[in-house]
Image: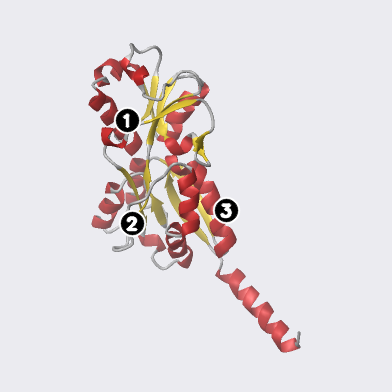
Amino acid sequence: MTLRSWFLSVLVAWAGCAAAADVQVAVAANMAAPMRKIAADFARTSGHTAVVALGSTGKFHAQIRSGAPFEVLLAADEATPARLEQEGLAVPGTRFTYAIGRLALWSADAALVDTGGRILRQPPHGKLAIADPRLAPYGAAAVQALANLGVLAAWQAQMAQGENIGQAYQFAASGAAPLGFVALAQVMSDGRITRGSAWIVPAPLHAPLRQDAVLLRPGQARPAAIALLAYLKSDAARAILRGYGYEFPSQQ
């Protein structure tokens, strides 16, 4: 290698390091497990670092309206990113559905939940964990499913509400609630249920859990934020998400 070519290679490497940056990402709690893999692969392929905050979509909406410096939102619904766009807090034209989630009835007890969800039609014994339906789309989907099954009134008094789907899962995982409505991604990895017993709630029982991503105003001039949104559309990101039970719009 000549001195000139060595110098150019060092310059290119230095420029790549200089371009690497952090991106502040607000991520719906149902995405906790896949986001760890996505963030790691994104860092490996782009050099950028996704700094992730997990929580309920409704709470993130309030925080962004109050000036939280998030650059990207990965929501658990499609309504919140659209609302942020209408409010002038998200960059128009950057919103897209990065995944369609699935709801599951789950128990840490491997023998409790049957594959048809018939346990919901039995008299309740113990608590049923759900995410707060006012803040979390998965909680709203759980209430819709119970209503469509005709058992909402029977379970209403037994509900243990978590602020987000992460807390609902913790209630069920700890045994504080024998049953819980969780995101399938919380109990699935590599296409299989990893622990306990689960019933994947049929999609017609609730509104589609279309999860949209959007570039927020603080990220509009940030290459790392734009790169993360591009990565979420890649085959690599979709392969990770598919392993956790997520689906994708047919037109994308």
Secondary element at tag 2: strand
Give the mark nearest the N terminus, 3 or 1.
Answer: 3
Secondary element at tag 3: helix
Task: Identify whether 137 is placed above or below 14.
Answer: above
Residue shown at 29%/34% (left/top)?
Answer: 134
Task: From the viewer's perspective, tell me whether residue 10 is left or right of residue 92.
Answer: right
Residue shown at 68%/78% (left/top)?
Answer: 10
Task: Identify whether 212 is placed above or below 161.
Answer: below
Circle 1: is it few (<14), some (14-19), or many (20+) Cα within 10 Å?
A: many
* The image quarter in which residue 155 lies: top left
Give the mark nearest the N terminus, 2 or 3.
Answer: 3
Q: In the rendering, which numbered label is found on residue 96?
A: 2
Q: In the rendering, which numbered label is found on residue 188?
A: none
| Image coords of residue 26 (percent x, y) | 43, 49
Give the mark nearest the N terminus, 2 or 1.
Answer: 2
Q: Name the residue under label 3.
A: 40
Three-letter amino acid code at the position of disc 3: Ala
Q: Mark 1 points at which residue?
A: 142
Task: Identify whether 237 is placed above or below 107.
Answer: below
Three-letter amino acid code at the position of disc 2: Phe
Could you tell me which quadrant the C terminus lies in?
bottom left
Could you tell me which quadrant the N terminus lies in?
bottom right
Secondary element at tag 1: helix
Q: How far apart are marks 2 and 1 (CA)?
A: 24 Å
Of residue 97 and residue 53, the one placed in the foreground of this image is 97
Residue shown at 44%/41% (left/top)?
Answer: 245
| Image coords of residue 213 (percent x, y) | 37, 54
Task: Identify whether 157 is placed above or below 238.
Answer: above
Three-letter amino acid code at the position of disc 1: Ala
